[in-house]
Image: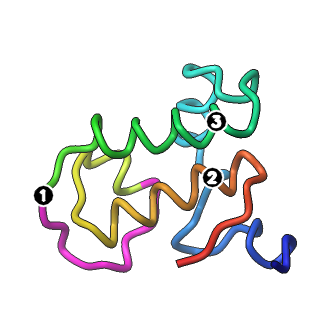
Amino acid sequence: MNTKRYTKETPILDFSAPAIEQLVQERGWERLDEYDKIGAIYHFVKDEITFGYNATDELPASQVLADGYGQCNTKGNLLMALLRRMGIPCRF
């Protein structure tokens, strides 16, 4: 896997957005080992971001977080942005 390619920020995976950075700090995810980071982020998106339909699939992750809801693709955007923020390579 091309680690550098799958850890960089994109317009949709906007992990340097202040709200995403604040979430990471509040949750203390940086103190976890990689396995626990993945689990904590997965459960956050699954359990704390309500299922609902957004205006478009192309919303940046920070907007999905601000809305507090998303459907499969937009929740995936948020999941990937959070994983990449933690340095965990991922792709859709």
Q: Residue furthest front?
A: 35
Residue 5 in the figure: left or right of residue 84: right
> Which amino acid type is marked by label 1?
Gly
- First of labels 3, 2 by sequence position: 3
Q: Cβ–Cβ below 8 Å for labels 3 and 2?
A: yes
- First of labels 3, 1 by sequence position: 3
Q: What residue is at 27 percent from the left and 67 percent from the top?
A: 72
Q: Cβ–Cβ below 8 Å for labels 3 and 1?
A: no
Q: Check disc 2 and report the residue beneath it.
A: 83
The residue range painted magenta reads 52-62
Q: Which mark is residue 37?
A: 3
Q: Secondary structure at mark 1?
A: loop
- Gap between marks 3 and 1 measured at Cα: 25 Å
Q: What residue is at 73 percent from the left and 64 percent from the top?
A: 89
Q: Nearer the viewer, mark 3 or mark 1?
A: 3
Above/below status of 71 relative to 91: above
- Gap between marks 2 and 1 measured at Cα: 22 Å
Count of number-bearing discs: 3
Q: What residue is at 34 percent from the left and 55 percent from the top?
A: 64
